[in-house]
Image (spheres, rainbow, N blue to C red):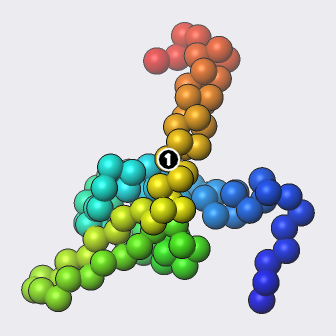
Amino acid sequence: MKKIYNNQVEVVLDLIGGKWKSHIIFHLGSGPVRTGELIRLVAGITQKMLIEQLKELERDGLISRKSYNQVPPRVEYSLTNYGSSLKDILKVVCDWGDDYVKDRYPTAK
């Protein structure tokens, strides 16, 4: 079933919104990362939730999954071209958030 969006912001928030997707994309911005390493990098995420979010990001064409035929199994995730195009957007969002916190909560560290 085709999704219907009212505006472009809904598209972006649908693809990278929520608690974990932007964190995953951020950590994949430096290059391919294995599943176990992502669990360590994305503080607080469960393995079940990580796998669910990775499947959604892969389905949406933002990340790719590469599985190696070896024991123990080795799986790496990396950003696709679409996913890589989000790095600059996330940088702007992070900078905005940093400025907001500094302005609104100047005594916070």
Residue furthest left in the image: 71
68 with respect to 108 (left or right): left
Q: Is residue 10 above or below residue 107?
A: below
Q: Is residue 83 above or below residue 91?
A: below
70 with respect to 32 (left or right): left
Which residue is under mark 1? 87
Tell me what residue is drawn at x 64 percent, y 23 percent. 100
- Position in image of residue 10 (x %, y %): 78, 59
Tell me what residue is drawn at x 79 percent, y 84 percent. 2
Res 90 quadrant in image: top right
Residue 52 appears in the rendering: no
- Position in image of residue 43 (x %, y %): 38, 51
- Position in image of residue 4 (x %, y %): 85, 74
- Position in image of residue 109 (x %, y %): 46, 18
Residue 78 appears in the rendering: yes
60 with respect to 75 (left or right): right
Viewport quadrant of the N terminus: bottom right
